[in-house]
Image: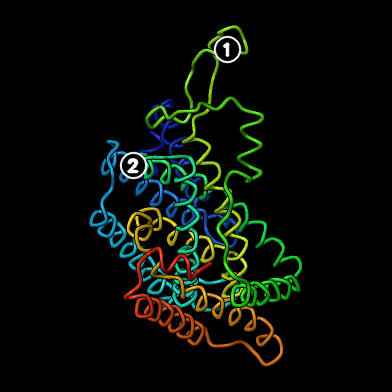
Amino acid sequence: MSDRIATMPGPVLRIGVGRVWEIRSTMELLAAEWIGKPVWMWAGFLTIVLALLAFDLGVLNKDDKEMGIAQSLWLSAFYIGFAMLYGGAIWWAFDRGLIETSDGLHAGVTYFTGFFIEKALSIDNVFVISLIFTFFAIPRKYQYRALVWGIIAVIVLRGIMIGVGAALVQEYSWILYIFGAFLIATGIKMLVVPESDPDMAKNPVVRFFRKHMRVTDELHGQKFFVRKPDPAKGGKVVLWATPLFLALVVINIADLIFAVDSVPAIFAITTDTFIVYTANIMAILGLRALYFALAAMVHRFHYLKFALAMVLVFIGGKIFWNQIFGKVDPAISLGVTLALIAGGVFYSLWKTRNEKPETQLAAAE
C-alpha cells in the first residue's frame, strides 16, 4: 500500500492527503466536548428538531388553514410519541454505557421527569396564548404558523437561559438552594393566590412596540412585515409590522416568563445541560400542536394548577433534602411527579365534567 502511495502523482497524493486531513478534522470536531457532551450529540438533536419543524411547517401546514381538534390531537400524539422514543433512546444509551451524565444520575429517568414537568407546566401557557391571539384578533388559520415560527425563537432563547443556568450552577453550586426556595415560593403562591386574566392592552411589551414601531391596524395574511405608504412621511413606502408579528413577540416573551419556573424546576431534577435542554425542547415542540385542542377545553384543567403547585414544592424541597439527608432516587422523583400530574388531570376532568366553560371561568376568578 505504501508503495502505491509513493508512486502516485504529486497532485493526486496532495488531494488524497488533504481529503483525509479534512475528514479527520471533522471527526475530531464532532467528537470534541461542548457543554458536557460531544458536539455530534448537540448537532444531531438540533438537526432532528429543525427537520421536524421543516416537515411540520413546510409539508403538513404549508397552506394557511384552520387546524381542527382531530388534526391537533393526531399531530400532538406524533410529537409526544417521538419524544418518548427519543427518551427511550437516551435510556438505552445510558444503560449500555454509551453516554454519561455530568451529575451521575440516570439519563433516561431524569429526561422523562423533566419532560413531564415541562409538559404539565406548559398547559398554563395555552391559556395565555389564547388570550394573546384573541386580543390581536388573529384568525385560527394563521395561528399555527405563528406558533411554529415561535418555536424557532424558543429553541434559541431557552438555550441561552439553560446555558446561563448551567454556568451558574457549575460555578456556584449554592445557587441550587435559590432555585429550590424559588420553586417552593412559586408553588405556595399558586396554591393561595387567585388567578387573574392578564390585561393585554396594558402589557408593557405591546405598548412599547406600538409606540416605537409602525404597526398596521389590519392583518396581511401570514406576513409579519409589509411595505406600505406612511402618511407621516408624506406617503413614502416604508416597512410596517403587522399584528401577527406583535402576537409572535408577546407569545415568546410569555414563554420566557414561564421558563423562569420550568428551567429551575428541571435543574432541580438534573444539572446535566443536555438532558435539561432536550427535555425542555421536546416538551415544547408538541405543545404548539396541542394548543388547538387544549384551547377549546382549557377550562377543564383549572384544578391542575394545584397539582403543579405541589410538584414545584416537591421538586424545590428535594434540593434541600438532597443536601441534608442524601440524594432522592430519581425513580422516586419520576413516580411522584407522574402521580401528582396524573392526579391533577383526572381530578380536574372529573370535577368539571358537568360545568360549562363560562361557569368554570367564573369559578377561576
Q: Quadrant of residue 174?
A: bottom right
Task: Please tell me whether mark 2 sits on a helix, a strand or a loop.
Answer: helix
Quarter holding residue 264: bottom right
| Quadrant in which the N terminus appears | top left
Q: Give the mark toward the camera: 2 or 1.
A: 1
Q: In this picture, is 257 found above or below 266? A: above
Q: CA distance from mark 2 to mark 1?
A: 36 Å
Can you say whether 354 is above or below 322 in the image? above
Task: Please determine whether, in this image, residue 339 is positioned above or below residue 164.
Answer: below
Quick one: 40 or 207, which is closer to the camera?
207
The residue carrying mark 1 is: 231
Query: In the rendered structure, which disc, 2 or 1, sits on the residue that comes first in sequence?
Result: 2
Task: Determine whether, in the image, residue 209 is placed left or right of residue 59.
Answer: right
Q: Residue at x 32, y 40 (%)?
A: 141
Q: Picture coordinates of residue 297 (x, y %)?
A: 35, 63
> Percent x, y for residue 159?
57, 53
Residue denoted by label 2 = 57
